[in-house]
Amino acid sequence: MEKTHIPEEAAYAFPPLPLEAWEPTKDTLHLYLQIAGKIRLQLMPRRNHWWNITLYVTSRGLGTGPIPYKFYTFELEFDFVEHQFHIRTSTGASESIVLQDGLSVSTFYMQVMKALEVLGIHVEILPKPYDNKSKIPFAQDHTHASYQPEQVNSYWRVLVTVDQALKEFSGRFYGKACPVHLYWHHLDLTMTRFSGKKVPVRPEASTVEKDAYSHEVISFGFWPGDDQVRFPAFYSYTFPSPEGLDKEPLQPAQALWVDSNGSPMAVLNYEEMRQLENPRQALLEFLESCYQAGAKRANWPIAELRVPPLDEL
């Protein structure tokens, strides 16, 4: 059997991800992901806090997981190793689309909808971006057509590493926590912990906000940067934001509190983290320090919600 090359851990798991270098590809990929996410949104049974609409990190890229349809299921997956988009059904039928530079959002959208029709899957989505800097309807978007495979692969490798760390961190908590998943509207890979306490919802809040923030949360995530934050970073916030949150210490030393729409948000620059001796451990320390800060200031029962290591049982 031919031996598989295993790359060096640090270089593979934490590649450089400068926003400006891959922003055209990121913007195109973001819109591809919105198309897949909207298909899942349309067909999945509702779950609390919009957990039914998200995408998941896979061993090849990003996918929807099984989506129910009639008497079977299908799933969508972006393969960032061989750079293809797959639609697979539990009946064995499948269709694939090659992901390549020059593939416009318009062409991708048309090809996806045609492939679904070939498979007998009929779904209608609102065919325009959601909460995105692009306002061009998918079918008319010939502007976004950049797809650089190496850049997409680097982004996905970061997601794989962060997904693992967030899952490990999630397992340390007895309370309600969401799956580690990617919200395709802002490209956030997130995990949220809940105290179980319901909070008043602002009457003027949108439908999205009313369900997302119906309960007290401490949220953690990674995003690759955007128009406001010009670098990839990890973040955490507590909602509702308790008094004095930004007075609590953060780890590692590179982490800091910043203002986010009038409330403190903890931020750790990805590039600064990847330069540390043990970046994965630094990420776990960041997540834990953010949780301790929010839970302490919001009076969560920290000891009761802690999952002890097996050697402490």
Image (cartoon, helix red, strand yellow):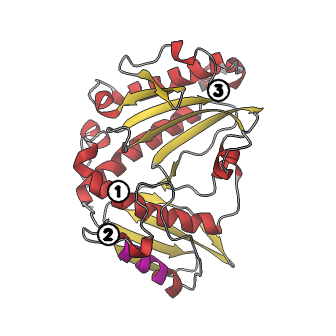
Question: The disc labelled 1 sits on which kind of residue?
Answer: Asp
Tell me how far mark 1 sits from mark 2, CA to CA: 14 Å
Q: What element carries label 1?
A: helix
Q: Does the magenta stretch include residue 270?
A: no
Q: In this view, does 173 lie to the left or right of 274?
A: right
In this rendering, the answer to whether 15 lies above or below 39 is above
Residue 78, position as x, y percentages in the image = 41, 64
Q: Is the magenta stretch mostly helix, strand or loop?
A: helix
Q: Is residue 186 left or right of residue 238?
A: left
Tell me how far mark 3 sits from mark 1, CA to CA: 39 Å
Q: In this view, does 6 lie to the left or right of 292?
A: left
Circle 2 residues within 10 Å: few <14, some 14–19, many ≥20: many
Q: Name the residue under label 3.
A: 307
In this rendering, the answer to whether 246 lies above or below 90 is above
Q: What stretch is highlighted in magenta?
A: 106-114
Q: In this view, does 97 lie to the left or right of 6?
A: right
Circle 1 residues within 10 Å: few <14, some 14–19, many ≥20: some
In this rendering, the answer to whether 91 lies above or below 245 is below
Question: The disc labelled 3 sits on which kind of residue?
Answer: Val
Tell me how far mark 3 sits from mark 2, CA to CA: 42 Å
Q: Name the residue under label 2.
A: 99
